[in-house]
Amino acid sequence: MSLSDYASFDIDLGPAEGGVYALSVLDSPAGAVRTRFSMPFTNDDLRAWHALITASLQDARGLVGAMPAAASWSAQQTQAPSLHLTEVEQRAFDLGLRLSNALFDAQVRPLYQESRRRAAAARQGLRIKLRLRTPELAVLPWELLLDPDAPMTAPRFLALSRQTPIVRFLEVGQAAEPLAVRGVLRILAMGASPDDLTPVDIESERRHLAAAFPWWNHLVRVEWVAGQDWRSLQEQLQAGGPYHVFHFIGHAFFDEVSNSGYIALANEAGQPELRTANELADLLADHPTLKLIVLNACDSAEGSPLDLNSSMAATLITRGFPAVAAMQTTVSDRAAIEFARSFYRAIANRLPVDAACTEARKAMHLAAGHALEWVIPTLYMRTADGRLFQREGVPIDWAKVLSLLLFTWMALGAVVGWWWWQGTRPIPTAVFNVAVADFVENGVTATSLQVGPIFGQALSDALENEYPLSGDTNVAIVHQHVGSIAEANAAAKLMERGFQMVIYGSVDGVGDQLNVRTKFLVSDAFRNDMGEITGAHDFAFPLTIHTDEVFSLTPTLAQRASLLVDLIQGVDYAAQERLTEAAAALARAAAESESLGVFDGREVIYLFASDVARRRKQPDEAMRLALVALDLNPNYGRGYIALANSFFIRDKSHLAEAQAFYEQALSLPDQPDSAYIAEKAHLGLGQVFLNRYLLAHDDASPYADDYATEAATHYRYVIDSIPPQPSPEAGRVERLAQAYLGLGELERLRGDATAAERFCRALTLSHTALTRRHAEEALAKLDRNCPDRTSAP
């Protein structure tokens, strides 16, 4: 489901009669209904809610560890099941549950459930549209509504799913029509941080927007107002444009005396200069192309419980702007930056504004962990379907022009500079180097557009823009002169030049559609045990684009680049034995993958995380993560190897479980050759039966000889599977060394004279200190030396 199309669940609330509010579902896929709504909170509850948000913000900044005493709840508090939630999350759950029970009563709930079913059948989302006609209802935390279809053991907030965005709908005059945007979407951004107020990190937000939409992209252009006062804004509006979005970052306030909201600009002396929503509207109102205002400023959505339209956001809607995104209360710089970054990427991907707001909430939620800042953004709109912009073709067919230029450039390079090009090689420049190849094209349509080089360049650019935001200077992204790569063998050849990861893939042209599949190879030069990080991996995002969108790839790829950055960091840290940091990076990648929905290859993240947990001597966590990988892909041989490894590192009582899962990996059909499942499983089984032999031998068990025979069989399988020529990859060579070591140990214990030869062979092959030390210790026990140690590393 694309979820760019929505049905509406249109709810009207108010006014009150005898303390009970009229509730009407005006429209939904399943019909309409009228009922009553009783206020589920006292004034003390609402004051506690504001204290909860304040505590959540402090928690996000690392200032407090518990709720303030003021945040106490009334006797109506609902008890939720044990969900391993923080105190802040638990109280948010309690509040949301009470609000949901009041809204989705015995009449509304079945209507909602049937509407969800019908919307899903029509491949639509269901927009929760709230028409709040009394001010005391407008200040309730509707963003905490829980999905009535979700079980109590796994509650879901509606506002965190693109399937069910929540909007506050104000019907002001004629409904706004979407604007036909010819060319790029233009954002006018302004930041203000007056001297006497808490500093605002304007530069970070500027960098994030620049990274999301660099100057050369074909979808969005961000321009910044030079100054921080109203004159600078007015001059920019006069000289530039047309602008489609106005974005403000700074401070906002609500004054209960004047019953008005203000934004804080800065005068020429840098002092605060407060301007009301009406004054801001006066500056912006003469620009009919402005369809969206984003107030990335604390308290810009706060209003009076006595005046429905008192907040800055509501006032701007009443002045005719189709949509306003604002903040209900104080928000941290980190959350404000994350909101803007994800919100505009979704807008650039042509999502309705409410879906874009949901994507931004998810990003805030994932970035901030247990904090509740994702609740703070509020979306007001008066457009019926959330669509503010519709694309028109650009005056020039840039796809054809740029394709022709690219073809001409390639032809010229082939004729004039082929000798120089052949002699040039990609150059790694960091400790951990990632090569991004041009994607291989399959299909006439793809080839005619030269989309493989375009896609490789766009992915490289997206990673280069995203990676500096991670703060890690250890990694280099290299695309120049990499060329196209079709398979793992070619990627492995590239690694010989000093790359630790190679990202490559294919583009299949089917009619007017292009299906993009991504793969990557992780160098095994630094990993030589039964771990599963190294080798080739499929990571096929469900990226299907129209041929007309070839030159507008950057925003689409930017969504995936953030996930890839954390994945790369996880591999990089694991290579450096910085396992705690590797686990954190992979946890972020797993969380980010949730926002991209279901896609092939997502199990790779959990596989990597399981491997890191195993190396951290955390068998329970390694097992849990391996099970998640297998739940995502039940035919995942590497997942069964990881699961078996998690049992093997426990005490000897778990050898039977390890054996069962190694054998399960061997029984799976259609495993990729590059995963070497059989080699890894047989090596694991060799280790299992060697340990079983040791236990049986100590206990004088009659099964000892059987276990020894099984162990030798599995070790010999590995030895016979890895021919010395052509030179195998380093990881396979190490498995070969471990097989010789295991077989030698078995033969030593049984008094076989060939044991010393096995240990010498392991020494010749292995580059791993642990393997070499075991071999040398075994030779010392035999009082033997290898005849030729010159070939050893």
Image (spheres, rainbow, N blue to C red):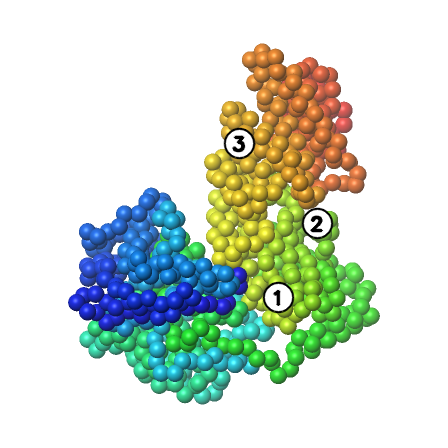
Q: Amino acid at mark 2?
A: Ala
Q: Where's residue 413, x and y in %?
A: 78, 69
Side of 255 relative to 416 (left or right): left
Q: CA distance from mark 1 to mark 2?
A: 25 Å
Q: What residue sits 47% from the left and 70% below the top? A: 352
Quick one: SS at disc 1?
A: strand
Q: Earlier in the sequence, mark 3 or mark 2?
A: 2
Question: Nearer the viewer's eye, disc 1 or disc 2?
Answer: 1
Side of 328 relative to 522 (left or right): left
Q: Earlier in the sequence, mark 3 or mark 1?
A: 1
Res. 763 image quadrant: top right
Provide the residue designation for mark 2.
488
Provide the residue designation for mark 3.
647
Residue 404 marker: none
Q: CA distance from mark 3 to mark 1?
A: 43 Å
Q: What residue sits 38% from the left and 76% below the top? A: 382
Q: Amino acid at mark 1?
A: Ile
Quick one: SS at disc 3?
A: helix
Task: Assess disc 2: are there few (<14), some (14-19) or many (≥20) residues with their C-alpha within 10 Å of its C-alpha.
Answer: many
Tag 3–tag 2 contact (CB < 8 Å): no
Res. 459 image quadrant: bottom right
Residue 479 drawn above or below residue 497: below
Question: Nearer the viewer's eye, disc 3 or disc 1?
Answer: 1
Name the outermost residue toward the left: 18
Q: What residue sits 40% from the left and 58% below the top? A: 113
